[in-house]
Image (tube, helix red, strand yellow):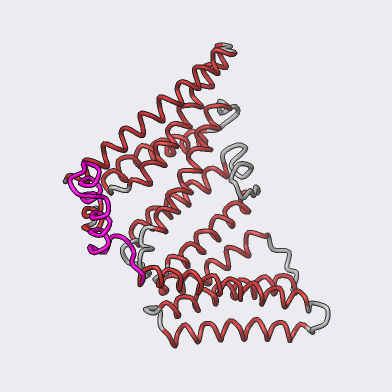
Amino acid sequence: MSARDHVRERFLQLAQRRRIPAAAAEEGLRLAGVLPDARAWRGFLERLCAYGGALACAAAVIFFVAFNWQAWPPIAKFALLQAVLVAAAGLAWRLGTARAGGRVALLFAMIACGALLAYVGQRYQSGADNYQLFLAWAVLIFPWVAASRSAAAWVLLLVLANLAAQLYAGRFSPFLVDALAGDGGPHATLFWLDLAAAALAERLSARLAEGGAGRLLPRLAGTLLLAIVVVGLAGAILDGGRNAGAGYWVTRAAMLLALAGGFLFYRRRRDLLMLTLCCMAAIVVATAVLLRLLSEGNGGELGVLVIGVFLVLASAGAAVWLRRLQARWGAE
């Protein structure tokens, strides 16, 4: 736990015990730099508007090319996309990635690179698979992402890698349900990819330059990994792994170890948000086990009652455990 988190927890505990008034605790947190002041809010809004503007401008360029698809010759569309890409990259080089403007310009250049690749693939039909577009996009922008020190750029790379993996596996779903259905191939591809991404994100969390965004990328990668683990384990439990090979069960065993390891790692990291998500994932998996047992025993209406009671008790137990952890970390 960082010094700022320690100060925050200590002030909150003193306020809960009524050692100090709530107003005094809030003022103390503000003076300690834990609560955002006007300057912090202004910086947050500036970053939000800058990245939102970059995404809007990138979408505008893409829609502008699509609107003039028939009216413009191919060379004009190539020239426009290349000019936008070069201008954005040049502005990022001029400003530098140490400044927020440089990181925003570099993110815009990454999106423009994808638009240019998509147009090349549309103009010159090569018969390539869809996943190759996202894979080539991710590979080409990786040096920029590594140099950007931007959480948003790493998030874009993570999204592209997952899209390429889903399309390569032959199933695509923005909610992972259809993508993770079947004989386990998509499970293995996405699981190992996002496990590596979560580990890399943890290593990069302290190096990201954007204020307050150090834990954004690790938490996003960890949440995506937990979603894959929950769907994979719950599916294996309910489906029973019929006609599954050895690789299927190896992946499921690795998923179970990843879930258990998540509890140990995030407790050591003192990340209460990710511990909460791990508890939710464990409750879902345990509920799937209970459903499987009750379905084999023909529980009927009694089974529904048992599951309801289990969910209440498991959620309450997780909440009590998390509260005790929070109090213990605040007292240290």
The residue lying at 60 percent from left, 51 percent from top is: 166
The residue lying at 40 percent from left, 40 percent from top is: 278
Most prominent secondary structure in the magenta stretch?
helix
- Looking at the image, the residue that sits furthest to the right is 70
Q: What percent of the width, then of the height, locates residue 85?
A: 58, 81
Q: What percent of the width, then of the height, locates residue 294?
A: 53, 16
State the residue in front, 196 or 44: 44
Q: What percent of the width, then of the height, locates residue 266?
A: 32, 45
Residue 20 part of the magenta-drawn span:
yes
**With 6 as the anchor, is 257 left or right in this view?**
right
**With 301 as the anchor, is 73 left or right in this view?**
right
The residue lying at 77 percent from left, 75 percent from top is: 67
* Above/below status of 186 relative to 234: below
Q: What percent of the width, then of the height, locates residue 68?
A: 78, 79
* Above/below status of 220 relative to 182: below
* Above/below status of 155 relative to 261: below
Magenta range is 9-38
Residue 156 part of the magenta-drawn span:
no
**With 270 as the anchor, is 289 left or right in this view?**
right
State the residue in front, 228 or 254: 228
The residue lying at 54 percent from left, 73 percent from top is: 110
**With 205 as the anchor, is 128 left or right in this view?**
right
